[in-house]
Amino acid sequence: MELLDWIIIGVFLLTLIGIVYWVMRNKTGNTSDFFLSGRSETWITVGAAIFAANIGSEHLVGLAGAGAESGMAMAHWEMQGWMILILGWVFVPFYAHSKVFTMPEFLSRRFNQNASSTLSIITLISYVLTKVSVTAFTGGIFLETILGIDFWYGAIGLVLLTGIFSVLAGMKGIMVISVVQTPILIVGSLTILVLGLLKIGGGGILEGWQSTLQYIGENRHLIHADPSDPLYSKFPGVGVIFGAAIIGFWYWCTDQHIVQRVLAAKDLKNARRGTIFAGFLKILPVFMFLIPGMIAAALKAKGVDGFNFDSNDKAFGSMVINLLPMGIKGLVTVGFIAALVTSLAAHFNSSATLFTIDFYKIKHPKASEKRLVWVGRMATITVVFLGLIWIPIMRGIGNVLYEYLQNVQSLIAPAIAAVFVLGVFNKRITPKAGEWGLLIGFIVGMLRLTLLVFHKDIAPDSFLGGIIAINWLYFCIFLFLFTMAVMFVISYFTPKATEEQLKGITYFTQDKAQLAETRASWSTADIITSIVVVCICIAFYAYFW
């Protein structure tokens, strides 16, 4: 990093201070502003915020590392622009009509308060143990690789900086920085892709692509159906498509930290168009991070100077250091740091929203708006503290970081996905079925996770050893179907929800006004652009199948 690069980074930090000052000066101090940016955002801001909330250090470090490690195998979790369309076209109308702040709040209206509290607890635990701590952990690695900052200073500094920003700026500040950093992040990453292809191709992009494909060999494929394939045991056949879809549905359509961005839209039209825009943006991460990771590994294999990284998690950082010129390196690094801040801030804000709306407000229904915002800020500080405590444990994850994240999420996602699917599309599912289906599915997933932690002490030929031996994607599919079956059985023996409770909150109980509002919110252009997103995803699968 040259002096000019450091100056650019300094300007970025001053910009953060400026955003905080602007938000604090124009704030109204109510919960809608702090948690949902006043429900006033346009589709461009919503789409950029969805993308920015998704792209964090697990992509800069983990996804690029996965590309260096196993080629295209993890692309299933990134080529999911079509899944964001399901959020916009199918689920957003129900969330918008119910006027909720959080996903647990939606479950409380569809099922009962116990279902809501269960989801809140599950989500908060998953944020602290995976999203917050992993983002900080991988951010520390990235900053150490790029800026030479000691891992601990980088990780702790990133968490503290983002925590302060989240507490003071709230959702409005996160939305603003999302719009600023998204184009820098995209242009910078794609520049690295092109320069990497030129480097390995001896000056030619197509030659570089062919060299990369030649290096990764069979790992260029998305589907590994041959049992003799080394990746078959992890990503067996088409099972990976269904497993990735279940995890993707949970993340894109029901996870608080994504859906909260959509709920900040000023109306249904902007919410849906924001998801369509995000669907286009979500096509890019494979080219922004996964393929550059593959190129970095290929350059390392060729013995190119500067690409002697000792861990695949440093693959993307090596591309930034060795390929970008002075000035551009600083600008792109700013985009990456902004991505880390935005993603982490999104987790902090969502955690604060969950605690404030789903726990504190229920216990203190007469609390003032000012008091609720204060509680939200205190909740943010608590999550920051817990995330810092958990970072040392994350240091043992190593080169399989991104795969680890998806593995853990495969145990959390199925139960939540099943509850939302049946809750919205089947009005016969009872409140108790939603409550117990969510709880039982989560417990089964956590039992599997516990067995994985202690797998060295379990005999492979035992019953528990057999459970461990089940492929993680097949287990994900099984848990999804098992949770659904549990809900159907419980619904047979428990009282149904009243028509008043279900009104407007399931697919078959919308009133005419709601249907008319939904229909008025989309146009032919929305349909055409959505079809384009789907076609691009299909073309990608056809090429890399």
Image (cartoon, rainbow, N blue to C red):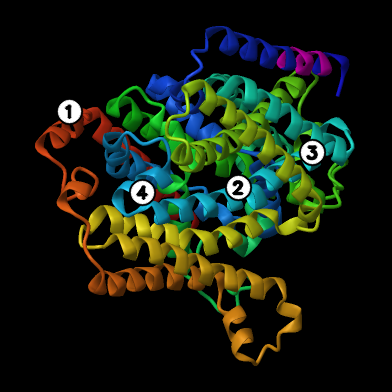
Left or right: residue 178 compared with residue 278: right
Q: Which residue in the structure is indicated by mark 4?
A: 108
Measured Cα–Cα span from mark 1 to mark 3? 47 Å
Look at the image and say whether residue 11 sits in the magenta stretch. Answer: yes
Quadrant, the N terminus: top right
What residue does disc 2 label?
Answer: 127
Mark closer to the chain start, 4 or 2: 4
Residue hosting label 3: 155
Q: Quadrant of residue 272?
A: top left
Dot 2 or dot 1, earlier in sequence:
2
Which residue type does callout 3 highlight? Answer: Ala
Q: Is residue 74 above or below residue 6?
A: below
Q: Nearer the viewer, mark 1 or mark 4?
A: 4
Side (left or right) of 184 relative to 485: right
Name the foreground residue: 132 vs 186. 132
Q: Give the amino acid type for the residue marked by disc 4 in the picture.
A: Ser
Question: In the rendering, at what x and y percent does residue 127 appear?
Answer: 60, 47
User: Closer to the camera: disc 2 or disc 1?
Assistant: 2
Is residue 505 on the magenta stretch?
Answer: no
